[in-house]
Amino acid sequence: MATVDVINGDSISTLHSDIIQTQILTRLDGPTLASTATTSSYLQTLCTEEKLWQELSIATWPAINDSRVAQAISSFPSGYRSFFADSYPFTEHTWQSEKHDPPTGLISAVDLYYRGEIIYSKIQEMETEKGKSGWFLSSPFRVDILDPKESVQTRIRYPGGDYEAWVKDMEESMKLNWILIDPIKKRAANISSRKAVSARRNWLTGDLEIRFSTIVTAAAAEVAAVVSCGSAEAWKEVDEEVGGEIHVRDVRLQVEDIEGKCMKGRDSLVILQGLLEGKRSCKDDEERRAKESFILLR
């Protein structure tokens, strides 16, 4: 979403509020809208309208346009404004639980992009409650967004020839948002790195695995969202010479230890809770100023 220059609070107060809300504020991205709200009490009132932040949130993360998510966000302290303030910045694992009680009822909202165009969106609820004393908490943690035999048809094609160049292009072209929502504690976090951190071939399946991960230094762990792409024909690998149509075959979340082994459900959920409750960080000065504005709006 494009940003626009906003005139100062004194002069803008002469404009009708409907004009400001429909012709000016709707053109702003989240950080600019949050910053604008701090310039005057008049603009703060207009910039904190729930519908404005709802539309902005859905435009930023299309997957959340779902009744289950809407119900969860409705319980947040300031609704979609709180949700956006939680989900937009990067998150750091700085929270520690004395009881290490794993969260329940988490919701995943996943949006996958290729060259700026969305190619897949989905909402999925984690079935953690039944595992409190059973298999889930003691088994390796993994959340599969696609069904076992499901694949996502895309417009992506491997032209054939230079496979390594194509791998690099895929790594640079793919973007993933994985919003984790805790309806009980009324928190949300984007646990994806947004941009891919690596892309390499899985020599067992032949698929290209693109990783979007967050490093949790305190727990010596990596929260990894993995997207697997392969040939449109499930029974064969991509022909490096001929090329062909590419499908998304797997979108999953797992938490790995320092040796790359998947951690168990209980430990993984505690780490995810730490990301939900942790500090929010920014990559540059502009995002840092936006973060400060979000804090004032929460």
Image (tube, helix red, strand yellow):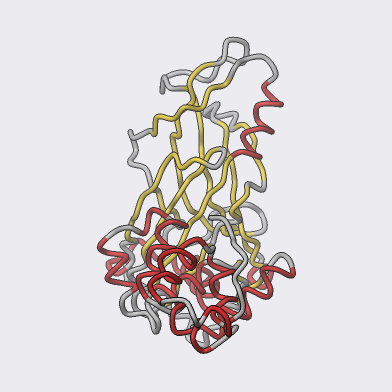
x, y percent for residue 59: 43, 56
Q: Between 137 and 172, which is closer to the camera in this rendering?
A: 172
**Residue at 54% over, 30% down:** 207
Q: Please, is residue 229 above or below residue 16 in the view?
A: above
Q: Quadrant of residue 93?
A: bottom right
x, y percent for residue 39: 60, 83
x, y percent for residue 278: 57, 77
Q: Please, is residue 131 above or below residue 117 in the view?
A: below
Farthest residue, direction front: 14
Farthest residue, direction right: 285
**Residue at 39% over, 34% down:** 152
Q: Is residue 230 visible?
A: yes
**Residue at 70% over, 68% down:** 286
Farthest residue, direction top: 242
Q: Quadrant of residue 57?
A: bottom left
Q: Please, is residue 227 above or below residue 278 in the view?
A: above
Q: Please, is residue 223 above or below residue 226 in the view?
A: below
**Residue at 54% over, 42% down:** 116
Q: Between 86 and 275, which is closer to the camera in this rendering?
A: 86
* Left or right of residue 159: residue 136: left
* Left or right of residue 68: residue 140: right
* Left or right of residue 88: residue 250: left
x, y percent for residue 84: 48, 70
Q: Between 86 and 41, which is closer to the camera in this rendering?
A: 41
Q: Is residue 267 visible?
A: no
Q: Between 25 and 216, which is closer to the camera in this rendering?
A: 25
